[in-house]
Image (cartoon, rainbow, N blue to C red):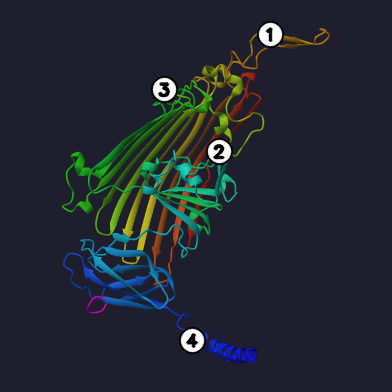
Amino acid sequence: MNRTSTQSWLLPAALCAALLWPWSPAWGATGSVVGRITDASTADSLPGASVYLRQLGRGVAADARGRFEFGGLPAGYYTIEVSAIGYIRWRQENIRVQSGAETTISAALTPTILPLGEEIVVYGKRVLLDVNEPATQRTVEGRDIEKTTAGGLTDVVLQQPGVAQVDREVHVRGARTYETGYLIDGVSVADPFLRQGMAVRPSPAAVESFRVQTGGIDAASGSASAGVVEVETRDPSQQLSGSVSYTTDQVSPVREGRWNSDGAQFVLSGPLSALGLPRLSSDSRLEPGFVLNLSGDLTDTHLGSGQPNSSIWGGTRWAPRSNNRYQSLVKLAWRLSPRHRLVTLFTGETTIDQDRSVLDTHIRTATYSYGWPFAYGRDLANYTTFTRQANSQSLRWEDHGQNNIFTATLARVFSRLHGDVNGKTPDQYVPPQDTGPVSIQTTPDSSVFTINPGDGFYDVGDGDQWYDHFVETYSAKGEWEGRPRPNWTLKPGGSVETQSLQVIDIFRPWLGLGGLNTDAYRARPTSAALLV
């Protein structure tokens, strides 16, 4: 009797729950965002200000009291941008909307002399992965790089998902190294010969942010098909500021485990007027500014002390250690008007060492090994010194409109790798010889004996390479980006590029004209492209 009563009660309850469940408040419920826009200096309302919900491409205008509302929003995280003529644009990231709840925000806009409000004040932390971007990309800010232990920009890139390093080569999604594009402020700085990627690598202290794209690469990236590493350098500060840093492993009295490493870095930024030059505008935001970054890293690594002697960069003066790297960056930026900005950038990098792994180029030769020259370990003074030099110069013009931006860029990028022994020409090379002590090994009954003519290390003679390659690229590029509709972006552009390339690779030059193996050629390719 009790069992029948229980079943008769459960059946109507289940039917009622099934009928009422789709209409319950939790099913399909939405949230809303409401807020008020004011003047930060007077606290007065700003009627008519534009409010844009980025994820859904929706926009509204504030009413007479500066209030706005977005209703019917699915639960999630949103970004809201507020703009008004004569005020700095305002943006808030990661606004959380919950089902059936109302989220309230307040936007206080700061007045500016820039009528189109190119400056943006951002509240909240930008998301690491933006699901609204058509590309799979991750952005790392310069202030986050400073918190890491990365020794260079390549180390930071290798920390990103989808990027790996094999034999000192950087691979994105497992693709070949030359299928990855490298950009600094929109200018390609990839060396088409080197497997290690960037020809010029700015110091992390000079980087504002960088992005690593591992999928969904657009046409603006040119021939890059695996990924794109895009670096944005620091903009000048409005007040004079700078820093000096020094790192070393010479603190401990224990010598074991040391690599004999020292590094120094200098950064200075501010308006040019702070250097004693005349002011060009009464508004500090329209004053031309500069960024100066100089850095140097010297180390013997775990391989011990070397004796590099660069024939094209100061001999032994700038090569006191086994590996020596110097970097420089100068950036000048001038906002000529509220809409127009002129930026010029100069970068440089020089590395001097005796590590033949730099010869692991795309035209890899199977006749010699790579890495540390073990056989020359006791005669490094007569081994090949490799000098890598790279520099870039660019001039960019920016025109910022209300809903569009136009940029035009002229650039030159130069990259060179040269290797020789103490400045010798190929016909001056001497063949290496192992003149070490002769050892004889015999069996106990002296029936079999082995004669070893040396100890396996060369005692006299020169290294086995004479190498020189360079790439000089001149390019011009123009792009226009606008929003014809709130949730549409149009980006046409074009570019032209001309190059001069040379490779001379002589293996064992002491064997006579051409050595044992020689590659030598020069080419001047030119390319052009249009995109939309």
Q: How far, Cα to Cα, is label 3 from label 4?
A: 75 Å
- Could you classify mark 2 by the number of other residues whose Cα lies within 10 Å: few (under 14), some (14-19), or many (20 or more)? few
Where 87 sits versus 476, above or below?
A: below
In percent of width and height, residue 458 lies at 61, 16
Q: How far, Cα to Cα, is label 3 from label 2?
A: 32 Å
- Could you classify mark 3 by the number of other residues whose Cα lies within 10 Å: few (under 14), some (14-19), or many (20 or more)? few
The amino acid type of the residue labelled 2 equals Arg
In percent of width and height, residue 88 lies at 26, 63
- Could you classify mark 1 by the number of other residues whose Cα lies within 10 Å: few (under 14), some (14-19), or many (20 or more)? few
The answer to whether mark 2 and mark 4 are in CB contact below 8 A is: no
In percent of width and height, residue 12 lies at 57, 92
Sequence order check: which comes first, mark 1 or mark 3?
3
Q: Which mark is residue 253?
A: 3
Q: Nearer the viewer, mark 3 or mark 2?
A: 3
Where 132 sits versus 284, above or below?
A: below
Q: Is residue 283 left or right of residue 1?
A: left
Sequence order check: which comes first, mark 3 or mark 4?
4
Give SS at disc 4. Answer: helix
Residue placed farthest to the front in the image?
A: 1
- For residue 464, say whether it is visible: no
Look at mark 1 in the image and give the residue it sits on: 438
Depth check: give the residue in front, 356 or 341: 356
Q: Which mark is residue 23?
A: 4
Q: How far, Cα to Cα, is label 2 from label 4?
A: 60 Å
Depth check: give the residue in front, 312 or 285: 285
The amino acid type of the residue labelled 3 equals Pro
Sequence order check: which comes first, mark 2 or mark 1?
2
Sequence order check: which comes first, mark 3 or mark 2?
2
In percent of width and height, residue 426 lies at 57, 21
Q: Nearer the viewer, mark 2 or mark 4?
A: 4
